[in-house]
Amino acid sequence: MASVNSVEAWEHSKNDLTSSSWTASDWETKVFSMLKFSYDQLTDETHRKCFLYCALCPEDHQIPVHHLIYQWIGEGFLYNEMMTSVHDMCCHGGSVIEKLKHSCLLEKVERSIKMHDVIRDMTPWIARDQDKNKRKVIVQEDAWPMSQANVEDRGKVETISISIMNDAKSYIQSIVWTNLTTLILNFGDAYKINGLHNIQYAKRLKVLELGVQRRSRIQTVARIPVEIVGLNCLEYLSLDRLFFPGSEISRELMKLKNLKVFILHIPGGDVVPLGLIRNLQQLKVFRFLDIAADTNVDGRDEKEFVEGLERSSILEELWMGIRTGSGLNQLCKSAKLPSCMHSLIVSNVYAQINGPLLLATLSKMKLLQRLEFLDLNNVIDPSAFDTLLELLDFPNLRSICKRFLSFPSLRSVEVLRCPNLKKLPFDSSSAKAKLRLIKGSQVWWNNLEWDDTAVEVTFQSKFQAYTY
């Protein structure tokens, strides 16, 4: 009711709340009925669906905003005839999150959101039609009873979300989910993800997320289940730390013609087939990350891969890493990819870099949110950077620029293992609009040199150096 000013509206809501909240027989339902009032006051069905979706995350878990919005896109919550581009849908998703925070249904944590424990407990209760349809949504704590349920009950399940469960394999293995639309599985042990041989029968599945927790060892990473290739309704696919088990599944994945969001984090040394992306004709978002940064990459393969991305007809949002000079030069030649680049990580490139061409390409990346240069052989003037600036492993770097630079949109600076960098290109007006964080070792912070005492005092008092 925070934005409601009408006395009549308050009177009506008071009567509605009083008449409905205390009719329930048990204490839990009474509390949930009162909290449900905020849910009922949400603007429309889109806001309600998006809110209920947050219950799929584990309790006390912080939910990255962009990840949640991509899932909403995959579910079709944010799409309408007036809003067809990813940018429009992301803006819509952002406004939904602001409304949910304004209604005290979500809490803000940096770039993530979280739910209060009581709100988190209420959300599945609403999603299951106030517990009249208890099999509709299966979250972590309900998984074991569901695995023992009869076939008729399994047919009622629409959503499953399980994270870091030691016995998760037994919950899914040999079970046929005929009406399942959303499946989110994040495992602590990689081998358990191999128990999905019946997933092919979930013909209505729209959202599939399979991942192995980051604490797992790379050697134990599982292969992508071959059976997912038959999921023709799939619109969102996230695969984290899973190997491609050969070219056959790669060719089969091309059949996922309705796929709109593809998030792929693969171990080092695995090869993404060149033709895969350009054959996903509906793909709008592609996030690709090779986890093992020290793995050698063939320059020809990466060049051809970038060329394949260039030919993808409707790609709107790209997150990727570049590891070779050939791949980087091909990106710089691209007429399309810079305009849809949201995240770029350039690492271990030892070939000669065309600095002016690279900076000209960076200036075209109007949507760029993340930019990293790691272990490069050449120092590049980052004056064109306008986002998240990270300088890592530049042992010989002494200065960034001889003059002060303006960074109107710069949000944070991180300097790591750059022992000779003694000056930052800032004066009292540099990056003052959005810059909130400067990260670096305490030793580096103490050794910084300032041309102006007033600027030094301002920066020392405004920013807290993070001690590694």
Image (spheres, rainbow, N blue to C red):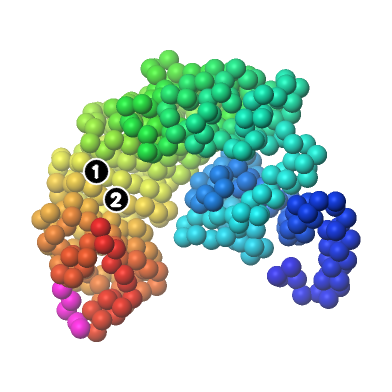
Q: Residue at x 71, y 70 (%)?
A: 3
- Secondary structure mostly seen in magenta is loop
Q: Residue at x 43, y 24 (%)?
A: 191
Distance CA(mark 2)–CA(mark 1): 8 Å
Of residue 436 and residue 34, the one placed in the foreground of this image is 34
Q: Residue at x 48, y 43 (%)?
A: 316
Q: What residue sits right under mark 2 in the picture?
A: 372
| Disc 2 and disc 1 in contact, CB within 8 angstroms | yes
Question: Is 452 included in the stretch rendered in magenta?
Answer: yes
Which residues fall within the magenta stretch? Answer: 449-453
Quarter residue 196 falls in: top right
Residue found at the very far front of the displayed protein: 26
Q: Residues within 10 Å of mark 1 (few under 14, many from 20)?
A: some
Left or right, 235 with respect to 309, comes to: right
Left or right, 81 with respect to 377, comes to: right
Q: Which kind of residue does numbered mark 2 sit on?
A: Glu
Q: Name the image quarter holding the C terminus.
A: bottom left
Task: State whether residue 307 is above or below residue 391.
Answer: above
Task: State whether residue 128 is above or below residue 107.
Answer: above
Of residue 32 and residue 13, the one placed in the foreground of this image is 32
Q: Residue at x 24, y 32 (%)?
A: 295
Of residue 398 and residue 81, the one placed in the foreground of this image is 398
Task: State whether residue 175 is above or below residue 94.
Answer: above
- The answer to whether one can see residue 397 in this image is yes
Q: Which kind of residue does numbered mark 1 sit on?
A: Ser
Q: What residue sits right under mark 1 in the picture?
A: 347
